């Protein structure tokens, strides 16, 4: 839920990343619609949290749980408009113990965030060795839409939000 919220707010802060390459041209979006990968018995589906940048953590959490449950129902209980579209995707393999991975972009979207497991790792803090819980995230981008500098600005905004979660509660 924090990753979804941080991604949505980062896209709002870096709007040039909230775009797609469609019909040979750039399409900029005003709404931030986050697709989240959900494993189902015969593959993968990406239900969409529409206008995610305007929803709080609780609302995002409830909506995602409901969409994921319906996606896993037999037959799938999602309407096509609930899993087609979106402006950005998140794929989380951390729950399977995967430390880091690269995700494949869901076209026509221009970016997908691959989220690895949060795990304790050694870090240097104030000049001393310490243990911290770290999570690896890898961003894949379509360079026709998002260049390296824009991708870095997005990741910087995401990092700032995810490392200071209280900023997302406002």
Image (cartoon, helix red, strand yellow):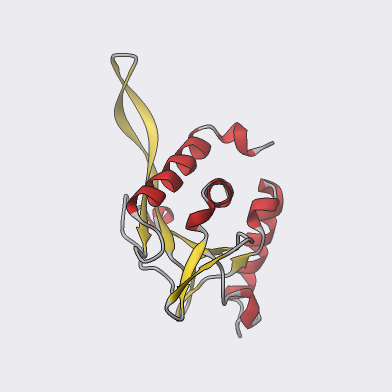
**x 43%, y 40%: residue:** 156
| Residue 23 seen from this side | yes
Q: At 48% from the left edge and 56% from the top edge, which residue is drawn?
A: 17
Q: Residue 49: where, in percent of width, then height?
A: 63, 63
Residue displayed at 29% across by 29% down: 122
Residue 162 drawn above or below residue 1 = above
Check the image and name the residue furthest to the top: 127
Q: Measuring 58% from the left and 64% from the top, which residue is drawn there? A: 29
Number of marks? 0
Q: Nearer the viewer, residue 32 or 56?
A: 32
Q: Nearer the viewer, residue 141 or 106?
A: 141
Left/right of residue 21 with respect to residue 9 in the rendered view: left
The answer to whether residue 116 is visible is no
Image spot of residue 20 (x, y percent): 48, 69
Please identify the residue farthest to the front as the structure is shown: 25
Residue 113, percent across and down? 42, 56
Which part of the image, by quadrant, shows the C terminus?
A: top right
Residue lying at the far bottom in this picture: please name it: 75
| 147 shown above or below 35 | above
Return the x and y of residue 28 as percentages of the image width and height. Answer: 54, 64
Position of 131 with respect to 58 (left or right) is: left
């Amino acid at each position: 839920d924090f990753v979804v919220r941080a991604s949505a707010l980062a896209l709002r802060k870096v709007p040039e990343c909230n775009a797609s390459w469609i019909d040979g041209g750039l399409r900029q979006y005003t709404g931030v619609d986050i697709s989240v990968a959900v494993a189902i018995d015969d593959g993968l589906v990406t239900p969409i949290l529409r206008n995610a940048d305007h929803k709080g953590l609780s609302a995002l959490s409830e909506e995602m749980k409901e969409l994921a449950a319906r996606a896993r129902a037999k037959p799938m209980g999602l309407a096509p408009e609930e899993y087609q579209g979106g402006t950005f995707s998140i794929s989380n393999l951390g729950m399977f113990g995967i430390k880091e991975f690269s995700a494949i972009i869901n076209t026509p979207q221009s970016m997908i965030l691959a989220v690895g497991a949060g795990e304790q790792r050694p870090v240097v803090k104030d000049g001393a060795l310490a243990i911290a819980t770290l999570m690896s995230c890898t961003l894949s981008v379509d360079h026709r839409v998002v260049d390296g500098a824009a991708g870095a600005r997005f990741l910087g905004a995401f990092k700032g939000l995810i490392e200071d979660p209280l900023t997302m509660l406002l």
